[in-house]
Image (cartoon, rainbow, N blue to C red):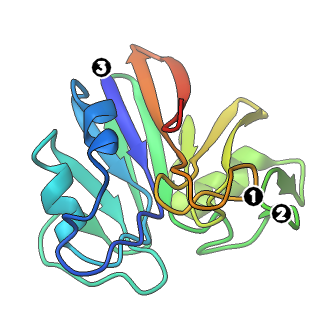
Amino acid sequence: MLVGVISDTHSAGSGRDLPETILSHLSGVDLILHCGDLECLGVLDVLEQVAPVLAVRGYEDPIEPGDRLANVTRVVKVESVSIGMVHDIQWPIKGILTNADGTELVFEANDVAKIVAKKFGDSVDLVLFGDTHEELVCEQEGVMFLNPGSPTYPGSKHAVGSLGTLAILDIRGKVIQPQIIDLER
């Protein structure tokens, strides 16, 4: 199963301002997961033209009834992989931080699986998060962490005014193959 992962689109108004290259790179995925800071529900409507979408709320995202937009965290099962989603890796409990520029994770304790289980109410294989606008893939104590970065307002690794990144997950059974897609390449 192919899963598109996107975060921090920060789209005002209708959501139709998403660059076409985002939609073309997501073409062919089976599911899109949005890690918050979408700013308007129209982003989800536009992304749903490509594939079904599940999202979590960012700092000031709107509230919507139904299952498409969860509050702060959610757990999604894809194949045999349990995926925890949150906008800010520090929500709703601390224990995992980012360094000053958002390019690395800092684990305050050794029991990462325990911290993650408390955060999501269950153990997960993969944690998806956003907030920093910096793309990141790492693994700690058997848990994979992925921040897709921001496609529209990328972090400091990217030229000012350029497009940023999103991620594609190729999930087969329990195997996760993540790929960060640089939209400028």
Residue 128 vertical position relative to residue 65 in the rendered view, above or below:
above
Q: Amino acid at mark 3?
A: Met
The residue sitting at 36% across, 36% down in the picture is: 4
Q: Is residue 68 visible?
A: no
- Seen from the viewer's position, the closer of residues 20 and 72 is 20
What residue did someone put label 2 on?
101
Q: Amino acid at mark 1?
A: Ser
The residue sitting at 24% across, 37% down in the picture is: 31
Of the 4 image quadrants, the one containing the N terminus is top left
What residue did someone put label 3 on?
1
Picture coordinates of residue 148, whole percent (x, y) = 54, 45
Front disc: 1 or 3: 1
Q: Which mark is residue 156?
A: 1
Picture coordinates of residue 75, whole percent (x, y) = 39, 51
Give the CA separation, mark 1 to mark 2: 8 Å
The mark nearer the N terminus, 1 or 3, is 3
Dot 2 lies on which element? Answer: loop
Residues marked 1 and 2 touching at CB (< 8 Å)? yes
Residues marked 1 and 3 touching at CB (< 8 Å)? no
Give left or right: position of 78 versus 50: right
The residue sitting at 67% across, 73% down in the picture is: 93
Front disc: 1 or 2: 1
Residue 108 vertical position relative to residue 77 in the rendered view, above or below:
below
